[in-house]
Amino acid sequence: MSVNFLKQNKFFVIINILCVLVFSCLQFVSCNSEENLESLISSISSESRKADSQKADLLLYEGLAEESKAAMEDLVTLAQVEKEQHRFWNTILNANQNIYSDWKIKSPESINADITRLYSNLNDTCKSNNVYFEQSANSAINVFGNTKEAPEKKYGFGLSSYDGFWPSFSKDEAQLLGIQSKIIASIVEFLAESSDSKHKITLMQILRESVGKEDSQHIASDILPAMQTRNKLIRFNEGIKSFAFLIKFKSHTSHARSFINQLRPPFLLRDLQVNRSDNAFVSTSRQAEPNPFTNEVQANQQPLPIVQNVESVFTLLVEYIYEVDRDFETFITDFLKNEKVNEDALSKFLEISGNSKIRSKINKN
């Protein structure tokens, strides 16, 4: 019967067999797919986490192009500032006319001889140019009641202590004192050039800074007090070295103006005080005069001031810049030893700042 059933229902049997086979295959595929699906889900989750991590990292670089552009603009600005600073300090130092830069080393004895000659030369220069010196009490009363002039002494020009006296200066200190004497000579010559034959100039005082330990012991009244230079000098750090001098004289304004106009770098005018000289104005009274229109005498006429002397006392603080330490080549070379920089940016900076020659030296090193 079963055989007959199979024969009679072949199609049905075949379909059942196919269904069993399909089911078995699907079951097998389903089992394998579940494992692959879990693996795929795990892989997708991992990639998603990596993508999120990369997005977080990319946020750090967001706007990098704009920042890079701004940084290059700042670099150009900085290079231009460096170029201007280099030009400015070279102008201030004025190495071609700087006494310190051109100074040839001399023996202390030779400097002593130069200063000794300086007294006579500057005294003669002043006398021949209508420049006089403010005299202290040079006269004395003798027992007979006659006034006797004391022997005239050469003016010291801030170096009074070394007129006929020369202590044991070190070689370096003697050089600085010699340089100061040359600077003072230039200042006095400026004053002489400012004079005219009509009105005299009275040199009242020249003060200077000490150049060292030995000089400090002998400079005496020629010392320039530190309080008079406080917050007034340009040497705000150790990279700038200078001497400070104070010169005080009595003259007309035109003389002072001429003197100041000659103070060109490395001379810098750091302070100026002007005080009206004593007896600058003398008041005189005029007699009452009749009014030409009424032929009456005007009453209550006040004395009218008449200018007889327009001299003023000028006190000038002068700074002489003799050294500016701006060794940019050493600075940039030492910097590059410890830092890595963009080569293109470095080349652009050096070119704009006027230091392109340094690039070849850096490459050699």
Image (tube, grey):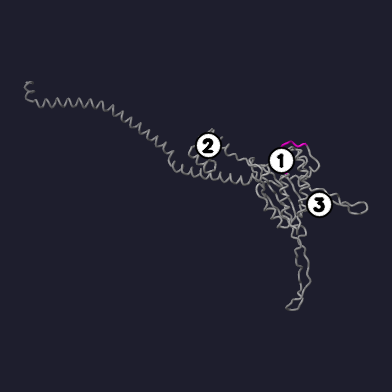
Q: Position of residue 220 (x, y in %)?
A: 78, 43
Tag 3 or tag 1, which sits nearer the N-term?
A: 3
Q: Which residue is mark 2?
A: 360
Query: In the image, 126: left or right of 4?
Result: right
Separation of residues labelled 1 and 3 (CA atoms): 29 Å
Residue at 64% in and 45% down = 96
Q: Residue furthest right?
A: 144
Q: Tell me if label 1 and label 3 are in contact, CB under 8 Å.
A: no
The disc label shown at residue 20, or none: none
Tag 1 or tag 2, which sits nearer the N-term?
A: 1
Separation of residues labelled 2 and 3 (CA atoms): 63 Å
Magenta segment includes 174: yes
Where disc 2 sits, the SS reads: helix
Residue at 60% in and 46% down = 88
Query: Nearest the camera: 168 or 137?
Result: 168
Q: Which residue is mark 3?
A: 135
Q: Quadrant of the N terminus?
A: top left
Q: Amino acid at mark 2?
A: Ser
Query: Nearest the camera: 269 or 49?
Result: 269
Magenta residues (range)? 168-180
Q: Amino acid at mark 3?
A: Gln
Q: Tell me if label 2 and label 3 are in contact, CB under 8 Å.
A: no
Residue 289 higher or lower than 216, as above or below? below
10 Å crowding of disc 3: few (<14), some (14-19), many (20+): few
Separation of residues labelled 2 and 1 (CA atoms): 37 Å
Query: In the image, 155: left or right of 6?
Result: right
Q: Position of residue 353 (x, y in %)?
A: 54, 43
Magenta segment includes 239: no
Q: Residue 81 is drawn in which quadrant? A: top right
10 Å crowding of disc 2: few (<14), some (14-19), many (20+): few
